[in-house]
C-alpha cells in the first residue's frame, strides 16, 4: 500500500483547500506537515509515500494557465526531493518514491541525487521514472521543443543505461576500504569510469557516490501507452498505473504482464499498483456524507485544467464523450480514452466529467465504511491481479489518518496488510527480505563492463 501525493495543494481533488479539514494549502510548504504524514503512514505500515512532480503549467484548457493558477492545479508546488530527508529522519521503515523526469535532468545528476537519497534514507528510496508531458517545462529548462512522445521513451532507454552504469558498474562493492594503516580511504583501482557514449548522452564518470544500500533505487514507472509499457517491461520493478475500472484494469494488467514476459523477465516480478481514491468513515452513511461535504468545495474547472494538461487536449473546444478517445496527443496517451472506458454507457457532458474528476481525479473511487472499502479493495485485487494500490485521499492529511485508523486495521485483520515491518529497505518491503538489490536478470546487468567481465568472477552487485 502506497500513498500518492505531491508537494502541492489538494493534489487530485481540486478545490478541497477550502474544506475546513484540509491543511494542504499551508501544509505543503511546511516540513512538519510532511513529517506528520510520513509518521501517520508508517503507523499504518504503508510501503511508501509516493510523490509526483511537474515542471511547467497546465495551460492547455482554454489555451491559458489562468484556470490552473486560480485553482492551484499543481501550482504552486515545491520540489519533492528535499523534504524526503526530513521525513526519513523522523521515520524508520516507510519508503519514499520520488518522481524525477528523464526529460529535464541529466542522468549524471539523477544518479547522484538518488544515491544520496538512498544513503540518507538507509535504502528506502524509489525513483518514479517519468518522461513528462508539459511542453512549457522544456522552455524553462532551456532545452528546446518537447520531443515526440515515443522519442522521449527512446531517449529514456539510453538514460537508463547511463544511470545503471553509474549505480551498478562504476564502484566495486569493496572499493571503500578505510585502511588507516595504509592511509587509503578508497581503492582507486576499484572505482571505474563508465565512458558512456551514445546518441543522446556522453558521460565519462566515475559515479560520485559510493554504493548505497540498494545501489539502484527501486525503479517505478508511470506511463500507460504501448511505448510506455514497453519501457516499463524493460526497466521497472513497479508500475504506477491509472485504470478507470476493474475490467479495464484486469485487461491492462494481463497484457502488461505479457509484455514483461516477452522481455525475458518473470511477469510477477514487476509489481503493479493502480491508483485509487478512498473516502472512509465508520459507516457507509457517514462516508457518503463526507463525500457530499467534499462536493461543496470542489473546483470542476481546476480539475478540467488538470485533465486537459494531462491529455494535451483542450476540452473546452470538443465533445468530451465522442471525440476524445480518437484524438491524438503528444502528452499522456493512456488517459485519452478515460471517460469512454470509465463508463461506456454514459453520455458525459463536460460539466459531469469535470465534476466526476474533481474529487479523486481519474482514480476509481471507493466510498464507505472500513468493511465496504476493504471488500472493494480485495475484490479489485482478486479480479485484476494487481499487487497493491497507490492511495489518493480527498483531504490532506485527514484522509490518510482516516485510512490508517479505519481501513488498515480491517485489512490487517483480513491478512491483507502487514501489522509491523520486518524488512528494512523499500525493495525488501516489496520483494521480501534479502532482496536489497536489483534482481540478477535485470536490464542493468544485461551488458557488463570490461572490469566485471575480466578476471575472477566476483560477487555481483545483484547478489551482494
Ligand atoms: C499514473 C501516471 C503518473 C505520472 N506522473 C508524472 C509526474 O509526476 N510527473 C511527470 O512529469 N510525468 C508524469 N507522468 C507522465 C509520464 O511519465 C509520461 O510522460 C506520460 O504519461 C506519457 O506517456 P504515456 O502516454 O505512456 O502515458 C505520469 C503518468 C502516469 C500515467
Image (tube, grey):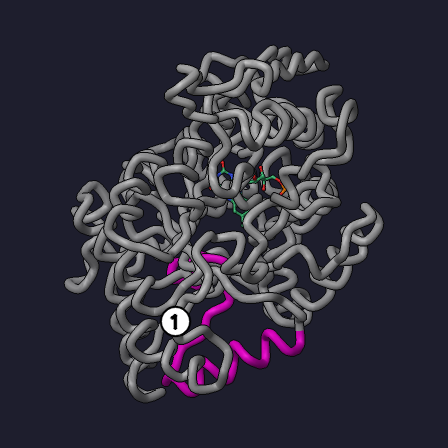
For the C terminus, the quadrant is: top right
Quadrant location, ligand no. 1: top right
Q: Quadrant of residue 198?
A: top right
The residue depicted at 46 percent of the width and 12 percent of the height is: 142
Could you say which is closer to the camera, residue 85 or residue 321? 85
Residue 438 falls left or right of residue 282:
right
Q: Is residue 17 visible?
A: yes
**Residue that badge 1 annotates:** 420
Name the residue at the front extreme: 181
Q: Tag count in the figure?
A: 1
Q: Secondary structure at mark 1?
A: loop
Residue 396 at x, y percent in the picture: 26, 59
The residue depicted at 49 percent of the width and 45 percent of the height is: 126
Q: Is residue 112 above or below residue 94?
A: above
Dot 1 surroundings within 10 Å: few (below 14), some, or many (20 or more)?
Answer: few
The residue depicted at 51 percent of the width and 67 percent of the height is: 364
* Range covered by the magenta-colored residues: 354-383
Residue 306 at x, y percent in the picture: 43, 45
Q: Is residue 53 above or below residue 375?
A: above
Could you say which is closer to the camera, residue 188 or residue 250? 188
The residue depicted at 37 percent of the width and 51 percent of the height is: 5
Residue 114 forms part of the magenta stretch: no
Amino acid at each position: 500500500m502506497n500513498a500518492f501525493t505531491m508537494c502541492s495543494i489538494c493534489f487530485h481533488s481540486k478545490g478541497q483547500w477550502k474544506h475546513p479539514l484540509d491543511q494542504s494549502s499551508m501544509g505543503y510548504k511546511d516540513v512538519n506537515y510532511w513529517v506528520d504524514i510520513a509518521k501517520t503512514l508508517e503507523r499504518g505500515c504503508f510501503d511508501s509515500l509516493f510523490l509526483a512532480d511537474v515542471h511547467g503549467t497546465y495551460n492547455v484548457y482554454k489555451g491559458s494557465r489562468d484556470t490552473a493558477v486560480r485553482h492551484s492545479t499543481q501550482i504552486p508546488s515545491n520540489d519533492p526531493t528535499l523534504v524526503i530527508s526530513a521525513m526519513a529522519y523522523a521515520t524508520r521503515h516507510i519508503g519514499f518514491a520520488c518522481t524525477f523526469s528523464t526529460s529535464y535532468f541529466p542522468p549524471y545528476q539523477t544518479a547522484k541525487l538518488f544515491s544520496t537519497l538512498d544513503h540518507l534514507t538507509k535504502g528506502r528510496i524509489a525513483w518514479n521514472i517519468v518522461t513528462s508531458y508539459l511542453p512549457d517545462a522544456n522552455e524553462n529548462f532551456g532545452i528546446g521543443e518537447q520531443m515526440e512522445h515515443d522519442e522521449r521513451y527512446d531517449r529514456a532507454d539510453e538514460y537508463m543505461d547511463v544511470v545503471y552504469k553509474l549505480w551498478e558498474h562504476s564502484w566495486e562493492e569493496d572499493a571503500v576500504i578505510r585502511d588507516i594503516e595504509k592511509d587509503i580511504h578508497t581503492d582507486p583501482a576499484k572505482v571505474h569510469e563508465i565512458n558512456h557514449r551514445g546518441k543522446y548522452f556522453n558521460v565519462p564518470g566515475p559515479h560520485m557516490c559510493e554504493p548505497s544500500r540498494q545501489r539502484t533505487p527501486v525503479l517505478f514507472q508511470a506511463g500507460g501507452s504501448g511505448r510506455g509499457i514497453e519501457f516499463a517491461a524493460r526497466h521497472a520493478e513497479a508500475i504506477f498505473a491509472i485504470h478507470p475500472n476493474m475490467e479495464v484494469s484486469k485487461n491492462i494488467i494481463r497484457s502488461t504482464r505479457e509484455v514483461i514476459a516477452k522481455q525475458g523477465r518473470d511477469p510477477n516480478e514487476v509489481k503493479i499498483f493502480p491508483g485509487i481514491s478512498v473516502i472512509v468513515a465508520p459507516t457507509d452513511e457517514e462516508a457518503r456524507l463526507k463525500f457530499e461535504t467534499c462536493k461543496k468545495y470542489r473546483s470542476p474547472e481546476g480539475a478540467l485544467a488538470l485533465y486537459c494538461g494531462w491529455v494535451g487536449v483542450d476540452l473546452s473546444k470538443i465533445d468530451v464523450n465522442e471525440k476524445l478517445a480518437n484524438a491524438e496527443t503528444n502528452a499522456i496517451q493512456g488517459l485519452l480514452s478515460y471517460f469512454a472506458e470509465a463508463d461506456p454507457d454514459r453520455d458525459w457532458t463536460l460539466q459531469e466529467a469535470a465534476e466526476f474528476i474533481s474529487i479523486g481525479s481519474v482514480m476509481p473511487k471507493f466510498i464507505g465504511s472500513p468493511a465496504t472499502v476493504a471488500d472493494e479493495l480485495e475484490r479489485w485485487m482478486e479480479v485484476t491481479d494487481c499487487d497493491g494500490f497507490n492511495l489518493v485521499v480527498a483531504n490532506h492529511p485527514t484522509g490518510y489518518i482516516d485510512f490508517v485508523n479505519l481501513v488498515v486495521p480491517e485489512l490487517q485483520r483480513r491478512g491483507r496488510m502487514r501489522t509491523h515491518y520486518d524488512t528494512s529497505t523499500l525493495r525488501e518491503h516489496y520483494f521480501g527480505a534479502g532482496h536489497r538489490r536489483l534482481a540478477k536478470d535485470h536490464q542493468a546487468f544485461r551488458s557488463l563492463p570490461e572490469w566485471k567481465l575480466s578476471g575472477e568472477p566476483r560477487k555481483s552487485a545483484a547478489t551482494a
